[in-house]
Image: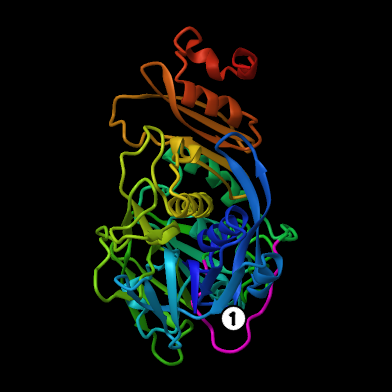
Amino acid sequence: MEATFVVIGGGIAGVSCAETLAFLEPDQNIILISESSLIKTVTNLQAVTRTLTKFDVEEKDARCLTESHSNISAIHDSLLQICSSDNVITTKSGKTIKYKYLCICTGAQPNIIPQAVDNDYVLGIRDTDSVDLFVQKLSKSRKVVIVGNGGIASEIVYKIRNTEVHWVIKDNHITATFVDPGAAEFFQHSLRHSTNSDEPTPSKRMRYKEDGQRKSGAALGPDWYKNLEIHGANPESVPGNIKIHYKAEIANVIKCDEGSEYAVEVHLTNDEKIQCDLIVSATGVVPHKKFIAVDDELTTANDGGILINEYMQTSIKNIYAAGDICAPNWSFAKHWFPMKLWTQARQMGCYVAKCMSSALNNEEVLQDFCFELFAHSTKLFGYKVILLGLYNGQKIGQDYEILLRMTKGLEYIKFVLQNNKLQGAILIGETDLEETCENLILNQIDLSPYGDDILNPDIDIEDYFD
């Protein structure tokens, strides 16, 4: 077999890459290799601002991709090795495929706590299969321990009902991956006041079941939890049944004696002990690289991610990478930085397709505008959350000031300013300030004439900066 473009990975980055290539190069053959027969495709894409988008993710059979794009062939297999001197890859099933350009989008895998090894009571959350298993196990659990402090852990804690929850985090505030202590305190109100009456909203994501052996699936999309009813074994939820263990990690997990009320006992680094039925590890991800390059090794970062330049090229000629597997290694724009998010996976997938198409046609490519400003839209604890630029003061040391406006249960707005210019913002709730903030960051407008009035609730700052 051979193709002009071979894309490895059926996640958001890989599928976005293949679809963009099919549009840019309709006369070229494209092969997409996915470990799972199910792929993730972006649908209902909406541009909120110049850099900010929101979209749904549909989980589809890979055949849907080949039916909608005649020049794409989808193969249910996994990459085993790369022979770059011959421009050939070998798959796990023994297929040999020749390529002109190869793009590696194998994503990431859960960075599960070490105590999970050979322990049926510790479950990692990363893809749809692991969520289904989690829901199944939780239905028999009265008390669970959640480990991790990112988006997935936060949403699990928020959505669980009829189960006593112990949330173990290594930081001094919740959801530290995304927000500061002030926003964390704002979210605490939602945790304390969440009720059993919350019903799951219908997901716009189509769901399919995969027959046979489970494979390593692609990462969860932005709406992974929306159609889930996450209920434990207790007959009814007790108010305030979430206990947060700050600045703690799991030191050991011991199986309880037969006849004990719970299955395992968790020992924390702060010497606390918790008996529970289930431990959920949602402690981030590491690059998913289970293949070898036989004649020239890919240069990698400390975490194992494949280093790429500003054109998404790896250290080996004609081999590119995108999504969670890669480690961007160029001089970043002031207000952008990489983060393992589905938004950046989609952006990188589309951009790497442009880079490979340009290489094929010997054309110059300009770096996509999305790399000018960090922009992420998500939902946490029931609230719309927009993160823009250096929203937590990343990259600018301690020399900055913060302007804050909070209305409990309604909105949380944080501006990060340096030299009277907006460098980043956190917008929680229906603030309608995302476009204004984006313009203020990109244009670096001097805000000193407005002082603290920039966040005065009686003044519509959009009127200042139309």
**Residue pointed to by mark 1:** 140
Image position of 383 (left or right of 107): right
Amino acid type, residue under disc 1 in the picture: Lys
Q: x, y (%) of residue 313? A: 36, 54
Q: Secondary structure at mark 1?
A: loop
**Which of the two residues, 232 or 298, is positioned nearer the viewer here?**
298
Most common SS among magenta residues: loop
**Which of the two residues, 312 or 362, is positioned nearer the viewer here?**
362
Can I make out residue 369 in this image?
Answer: yes
Q: x, y (%) of residue 195? A: 68, 56
Q: x, y (%) of residue 282? A: 45, 65
Q: Quadrant of residue 85?
A: bottom left
Q: Residues within 10 Å of mark 1 (few under 14, many from 20)?
A: some
Q: Residue furthest top?
A: 449
Can I make out residue 236 in this image?
Answer: no
Q: Residue placed at 48% from the left, 40% from the top?
A: 368
Image position of 45 (left or right of 259): right
Q: x, y (%) of residue 288? A: 39, 69
The reply to whether the magenta stretch includes residue 217 is yes
Q: Residue placed at 54% from the left, 88% from the top?
A: 213
Image position of 313 (left or right of 183): left
Q: Vertical placement of 226 versus 176: above or below?
A: below
The reply to whether the magenta stretch includes residue 279 is no
Q: Residue placed at 42% from the left, 40% from the top?
A: 181
**Which of the two residues, 70 or 396, is positioned nearer the viewer here?**
70
Q: Vertical placement of 302 versus 53: above or below?
A: below
Q: Residue furthest bottom?
A: 258
The magenta span reads: 205-218
What colour scheme has been applied to the protein in the rendered image? Answer: rainbow
**Which of the two residues, 241 or 79, is positioned nearer the viewer here?**
79
Q: Quadrant of residue 84?
A: bottom left
